[in-house]
């Protein structure tokens, strides 16, 4: 039932998108309303009385005369691109289950691939910071996986070199449905890394269900209890009911990443995983993803391109 609801929900049609976000003025109004939901607040003195300098797109505080651009200090800052282009990028990134390569995104937006890459990674950064601090609760299915090359989401590469290891964890409701997914890069599948993951990402009252890979017993260092369910090996392991949702999520990631990207360098892996996680966790309400992402975007300090490209996020 739940899966069908997700698969067949309409999302936001292109026509509806154009109606809501088709003009620069509409996008600007949404950014302003997201940034100042109670009306303009001066970032310098917290004054609210202001004038709008129409010709330069600035808000001027009546009290201290400081002029503020609605996009200053947000992810949309210092861009020569119109907000319309950003909104169209958000549309493509959130409405397609598979995600989109920067080549394809550039083509759709009518910008160079490098520009599309920057937009995409800035928005991924927003998604990552948005979800990074939330903990999973209750029953959590956990599994180990790798991203990169052919074995993305695959299991057979346990310990394979050149791959980036990550933990996939799904919180499930008592009725068995998935509530929330987390995908976190780890340095390795060792007890130390898993203890760190548990402390950062799991509520101490969690019951973690794993297939018994040795390092997973370290979730107890985060206060969680640990239940091992032996799955054996081979294709039957992937069908074990106890791991239905974590396996489903990993299958979807594999399809999304191998279908869309040729390769992903290790330093960018957390942002790719964050994009997938963000979409998965909001899959019941595709249309709301754009306003929600806008809300988060005006609250995310922009990372310079240079750092985005180099930093280990
Ligand atoms: Zn002021």
Image (cartoon, rainbow, N blue to C red):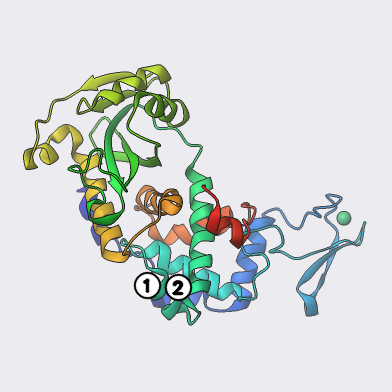
Residue displayed at 26% across by 64% down: 259
Residue 291 in view of the camera: no
For residue 78, above or below residue 251: below
Secondary structure at badge 1 equals loop
The reply to whether dot 2 and dot 1 touch (C-beta < 8 Å) is yes
Looking at the image, can residue 249 be seen?
A: yes
* Total numbered circles: 2
Residue 90: image location, x then y, percent: 47, 65
- Spatial distance from mark 2 to mark 1, Cα to Cα? 6 Å
In the image, is 27 to the left or to the right of 177? right
Image quarter where ligand 1 lies: bottom right
Residue 239 left/right relative to 279 = left
**Residue 170, above or below 149:** above
Residue wearing tag 1: 13
Residue appearing at x 83%, y 49% in the figure: 46
Q: Position of residue 191 (x, y in %)?
A: 35, 24
Determine the residue located farthest toward the bottom in the rendered image: 110
Of 130 and 45, the residue lying toward us: 130
> Which residue is identified by label 2?
17
Residue 196 in the figure: left or right of residue 262: right
For residue 279, which quarter of the picture? bottom left
Question: Which disc, if any, is residue 21?
Answer: none
Q: Residues within 10 Å of mark 2 (few under 14, many from 20)?
A: some
Tell whether 69 sits left or right of 242.
Answer: right
Classify mark 2: helix, strand or loop: helix
Q: Is mark 1 within 8 Å of ligand 1?
A: no
Q: In front here: 259 or 25?
A: 259
Q: Residue at x 34, y 52 (%)?
A: 284
Q: Position of residue 265 (x, y in %)?
A: 40, 55
Judging depth in this view, the residue of 176 and 253 nearest the camera is 253
Query: Residue 125: x and y, percent?
Result: 52, 53
Task: Kindly indicate the quadrant of the structure image that contains residue 29.
Answer: bottom right
């Amino acid at each position: 039932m739940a899966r069908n609801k997700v698969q067949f929900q309409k999302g936001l049609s292109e026509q509806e998108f154009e109606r809501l976000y088709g003009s620069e003025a509409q996008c600007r109004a949404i950014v302003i309303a997201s940034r100042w939901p109670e009306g303009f607040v001066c970032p310098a003195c917290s004054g609210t009385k202001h004038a709008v300098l129409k010709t330069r797109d600035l808000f001027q505080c009546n009290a201290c005369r400081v002029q503020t651009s609605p996009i200053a200090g947000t992810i949309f800052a210092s861009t020569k691109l119109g907000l319309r282009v950003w909104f169209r990028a958000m549309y493509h990134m959130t409405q397609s289950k598979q995600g989109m390569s920067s080549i394809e995104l550039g083509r759709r937006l009518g910008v160079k691939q490098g520009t599309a890459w920057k937009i995409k990674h800035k928005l991924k950064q927003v998604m990552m910071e948005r979800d990074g601090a939330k903990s999973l609760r209750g029953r959590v299915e956990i599994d180990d996986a790798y991203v990169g090359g052919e074995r993305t989401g695959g299991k057979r590469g346990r310990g394979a070199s050149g791959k980036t290891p990550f933990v996939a964890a799904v919180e499930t409701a008592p009725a068995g449905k998935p509530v929330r997914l987390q995908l976190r890069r780890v340095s390795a599948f060792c007890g130390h890394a898993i203890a760190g993951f548990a402390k950062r990402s799991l509520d101490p009252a969690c019951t973690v269900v794993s297939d018994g890979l040795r390092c997973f017993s370290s979730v107890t260092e985060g206060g969680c209890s640990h239940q091992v369910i032996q799955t054996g090996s081979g294709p039957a392991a992937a069908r074990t009911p106890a791991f239905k949702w974590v396996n489903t999520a990993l299958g979807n990631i594999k399809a999304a990443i191998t279908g869309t990207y040729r390769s992903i360098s290790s330093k960018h892996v957390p942002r790719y995983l964050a994009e997938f996680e963000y979409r998965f966790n909001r899959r019941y309400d595709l249309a709301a993803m754009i306003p929600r992402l806008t809300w988060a975007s005006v609250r995310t300090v922009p990372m310079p391109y240079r750092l985005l490209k180099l930093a280990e996020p």
